[in-house]
Structures are given as C-alpha cells and as structure tokens.
Image (cartoon, helix red, strand yellow):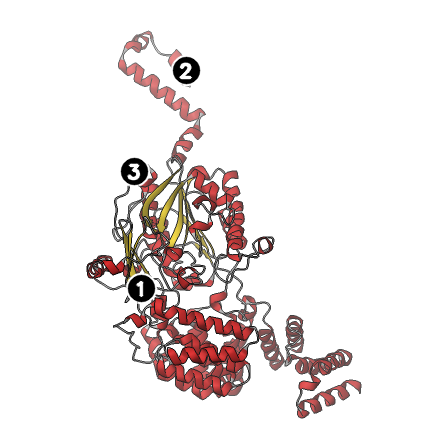
Amino acid sequence: MIGFCQNKVSKERKDDKKTPLYTIRVLLGLFLLWIMFFPFSLYSLKKEKKNPNFLLITIDTLRADRLSCYGSQYPKTPHIDSLAERGVLFSRAFANTSTTLPSHTNILLGTTPNYHGVHENLNFMVSKKLLTLAEHLKNNGYSTGAFVGAYVLDSRFGLSQGFDTYNDKYSRLHSVNLPSLERKAEDVIEAGLEWLEGRVSPWFLWIHCWDPHTPYDPPEPFKTQYRENLYEGEVAYVDLTLGKLFDYMEKNDLFDSTLIVFTGDHGESLGQHGEETHGFFAYNSSIWVPLIISLPETTPGRVNDYVSHVDIFPTVCDVLGITKPSFLQGKSLLPALKGKKLPERPIYFESLYPYYSRGWAPLKGFIFKKKKFIGSPIAELYDLDHDFDELNNLAGGQDITKLASQLKQIIRALTPSEKVEAAQQIDRETRKKLESLGYVANVQVSPKKDFSPQDDVKVLLPYLNKTNESWELYKKGNQEAAIKLLKEIIKERKDIDLAYKHLASIYKEIGNTEEAVAILEQGLQVLPSSYEIFTEYMKILLSAQQYDKIISSFKKRSMREAEYDPAIWNDLGTAYARKGYFEKAIKAFEKGLSLDNRNPELYNNLANVCYSYGLQSKDPFIYSRCFQYYKKAIELDPEYPAAYYGLGHAYREEGNLGGAIYCWEKALEIDPDFRQTYFDLALAYLNTGKKAKALDLLNGYKKKYYNLMTPSQRKSLKALIEQCLK
C-alpha cells in the first residue's frame, strides 16, 4: 500500500524527497512495514523486559562441608556442584537460628527473630501482619508456589502467606506423630515440577527437602552405599533428586531467565561439641550453611564475605528490580554478585529451643570482623579466621562486659518498638468458651529470668545425652542399668525433663504404670512448666484410664505449648469423652482441629463423640455430623481401620447393613488384628444370611485370640458359632 501511494504522488511532491519531512515519512513507512511483517519482534522485546523467575531451594539440616563444591570428601554432589559452577558460591554464610521454622522465617521475611518473634518450632506462628517474600513478589505480578517436605513447615505455622499454592501434602497417617510427618525429596520435586509445567513467567517457586534431618534413612542404593554414614547418604540422595529439577530447567531454557538461591536452613553437629543433631548450640557445625546464588549473565565465582539468611530477601528484590520493603534487616548481596566487596556488619544468631522447651539459659550471639561471641552464662569468643571449628575459647582473656553490651545493642537495634505477636490468636468468643470449659488457665507460667553457669546449655546437654544413652541401654535389653542411670541423673540434676520421661516410659512398658505416673508427678513438681513431662503424663494417664486426673491436671496448669499443639487437645477430648462429657469433648477436639485441620485421629475421635452424643441426646443434627467426620478421617488416611469401624456402626444404626459390612470388611483388610471388628461383622453376615462367611470369620478369630479371651467372651463366641451351624 505504501509503495502504491508513492507511485501516485505528483511531481511537485517528488520534489520534496530532499526535505526532512520526506525522510520522516519514509522512516515511518518502514516502521509500519516492520510492524506488519515482524509482529513477533515487538513481543520478543516485551518478553525480554519481564522480570526473571525466582527459584528458592532450601535443604533441611545441610552442612556446607558435606557438599563437594565446599571441599567435602564425603558424598559426591555433582548436581549441586553444577549449580555452584554456574553461580556464585558464598563460603561464609550463616543461619541466624539453628531450627527449621525460625530459619525459614528469617529467609522469607528478611528479618531476625527479634523482629518477627518466631524463635523455635513448636511455640510460634508467623504473624499475619508481617509481609513475606511470597506476598511481596505476588504483589509485583509473580505467581507463587511452595512445596515443603515436613510438618514443621505446615501451612498452619504461617509461612504459606502469599503463596498461590502451598503444597504440604505429606501422608497424614493416624499412627504417626505430627512432628515426624515428612515426604521424600523426589515427591516434593515431582509436585513442584507439575506446578511449574506450563507456568507463565514470572514465577516464584520454593522447594524444601527435609531428608537430611534425623532419622537418617536414605532410600537404596544410598542406604547400602553409605551404611557407615547414613547422613551422607541422605545428602547424596537429595543431590540426585535435584538433578531431575535441574534437567527440567536445562531442557526448558530456564537457567537463562531464573534467579536461583540454594541454601540450607541450618547445619547438623554430628557429635561435634557434644551435640548429636542441632537446636541446642549455635556453633558453626549447626549454623554455617551453604549459599549458592545463580542468575543470568553473572560471572561465576566465590565470595568469602560473611553473610546470613536475612540477606536473601533484599538480594532477591535488587536482582528482580523490585522495591525493597523498609523493614528488612539484611543487606543486598548484589554488589558481591558483581564482584564488589561487601561492608562488614554484625551477624546476629540465636538458639532458643532449650530456653523455650526446657527453661535453660538463652543462647544469643553475633559474628563481626571474623570474631564470634556467644553470650551465655559461660561466655565464648572465637577467632573464626584461625579457628573455624571453635576449639579455642578466647573469652577468658577478653573484656566480656564490652562484648555483652555490644550484643545488647545489636538486639535492641533489631527489635521493633512494637512487639510482634508471633502466634495465631483465637478470637475472643472462642477463647471465652474455652475458658468457661476450663481449657485455658488465666495465668501464664513465667520463664526464668536470671541464669547461672549451672543453667548453661554446655553444662546441661551432657545430662540430656546421658538420658539418651539410658534409653539405648533399655532398647538393648539392659533394663536395670537404664533405670539406675536415669535415677542417678535425676538425683544429680533434678531439672532434666527427659530423664523423668524416659524413666516413666520404661516403667510403663514393663507394666508398672503406677510407678510411671509417680515419676512424672515428681518431675512436674520440680519442673511445673515442662511440656515434655506434661505431655508424657497425659499419655500415661490416658493409657491407665485415669480420666479425672487428666482433666484436673489440664485445668491446674497453664502450658503455652498447649495453645499450638493439637495432640494435647486430642488427649483432653478423649478423657472428656470417656467420662461422658460429650459437649466438652467436642470443644476439645474442635480446638485441636483449629490447630491442625488435617489430623485424621482428631476427626475420627470427634466422629465417635458425635455418634455417642447424638444417640444419647436423640439429636439428629449432632448424630449426622459423625458421617462427615468419619469420612474426612478416611479421606486423610485411607488406611485408618478405626474410622472404617466407626463409620460401619453409624451405617448399621441407620439400617444400612450393606454399608456397615463394606466398612468392617475394609477395616479387617487394612488390619487383620483389629479385633473388635470380628464380632460385629460376623453378626452382620448372620443377619444377611451369609452363615458360611460368618463361620469362617469366627473360626479365624478363635484360632488367633482364644487364649486371650475372657470366659464371657468365649461363651459369646461359642454361641455365635452355634448359630452359624444351625
């Protein structure tokens, strides 16, 4: 069209060729032609201006010195090494805390626990008032997905804020303690890749692998290959699994458009300084972590500056071209990624799990100019440039008062004027209802404020290690030696909670429940705020059917941890249910579900109460709820025989004998030793004319359990068998 028009112009207009106006017209025409015939060029330019994607990989309990790229002679980690080869490796990166939940909170909020208030795993939840990295990126146009490997990062703890998808779908088995719930790295990464498939940029993906955490149990062939050191086997397994993620990125050209941050949440002591795992001390064995940052068009290299987890959030903002929130307490590492030297600044760290869980002295400190000060009753100072393994404590020859004052100043600077409540608060109406039922005491137990050297973690941890030794003795069959050692520990240090717990557990297992209860009551007199002893006390009272004691003990004690632990509400609800206090039982189970709404045991127990209370009160609404809760328990754990058994009774009560038979058959299929099902199913078979099936079932039961039956049970069994033979 443009060429056609030009052919039709008059001679006078042709004379304008030499004018600037003519040149502009020609250029405009060429530009229009370019738009018409090359439309994808503009799209490509626009696409290139999009912010990079962001991939965050955190490996739980990962020591930096177990990676080949950090000089490890242990497992070979080729996939993590390949990331280090294309990115920048930080040789001196530190976690600000030594446990999982607070460490990830530090990373995803860019602040220390002094600001966000999350100090350890059980007692805290991230406040909804705080801005997470996921929320910040979502506000800037990113789709966000998180895939975590263990219960300690369950969505109920608050880190799900800002994620479009927060995938914590590990198997919820009724028989597994909540803190033990986890899933393998391959399951986490597979779920993450499904989310990533077809994802439009920009996106933020967080992958968390739990595997190197205790207990160390890598799959084959790593279990055999690393049988002498299963921790290294876990690290090697995670590396292999990450290869699948990196292969996907390579295949889809994502390395060129993605910022990748790889780190560990904390380390693992593996026996150094007398600590087997982590969470007690804050030596480098447990807070020195790997940190590798890879981004497009950056020269690979190595940075020896001292950095920490709180530096990740501001770095991500700078790399992605997003405004940094004003509250961030870390510093951007972008200058280091460009080869520049970072200014030295103090790095704060803490390990407060022993303080909150056992009342031991708090452990806080800082690293500055390659010196590390640990502020505790027995202070420590190390020159990390010459003593990175922290073997030579220099505190004896230094002015500790000055260092302690400096630590206080650092903490003061990191603490906001308005304290952040790191807990998910229940509403006032619910709290009043709970208090009226005696669930929440009014007075909070105050933690100890003044500590002596006898309260230092270094003094107390060896006693805790001895209690673990005693348990190993017991498991090996040396019962007397185990009991003797535990009694010696209690005599010498009455404040070691685990000693009471282990001693009571041994007595319980050998059938001396009375002595077990007495030991725990002795422990609670000395350590009234010990949640470790309290929860064990509730369990043993439950097994001893001492329901009144459970209820009265719960009312008498104010346990901060109970506000965040669904298991204790399950125990309380069970006690109320066994006493026939159905309304109180329902409230207790509902409280537990408000803390963890994917707990199959809580749903099953709530269903049982609704079943019994509904029949007793003849309230059809309450009764109908039992179906909903039984089915929810089965949905969460399809291998839960008790839920099928209860649902079978509910169906039978409605007259649906076919539904009852299906449920009871399913219960026995899952667990052939689920004894209470045999008689109910046999009767159902008899009532539907299936005498042969009923007879086979009862004969099988007789063969397995006759010697364990009471005379009255044997009489009932004989009568049923005779009915089948008529």
Q: Which mark is residue 310?
A: none
Mark 1 neighbour class, 10 Å CA radius: few under 14, some 14 to 19, many 20 or more: many
Q: Which residue is mark 2?
A: 3
Q: Which mark is residue 340?
A: 3
Residue extending furthest right? 726
Using the rendered image of the protein, determine whether residue 466 is visible from the camera's viewpoint: yes
Residue receiving disc 1: 363
Instruction: Tell me how far mark 1 sits from mark 3, CA to CA.
Output: 33 Å
Front-lying residue, 424 or 41: 424
| Residue nearer the viewer, 274 or 138 | 274
Q: Mark 1 or mark 2: which comes first in sequence?
A: 2
Q: Position of residue 489 (x, y in %)?
A: 41, 77
The answer to whether 697 appears left or right of 573 in the picture is: right
Q: Earlier in the sequence, mark 2 or mark 3?
A: 2
Residues packed near mark 2 inside 10 Å, few (<14), some (14 to 19) or many (20 plus): few
Q: Secondary structure at mark 2?
A: helix
Amino acid type, mark 3: Lys
Tell me which residue sits at (44%, 86%) in the image.
518
Dot 1 lies on which element?
strand
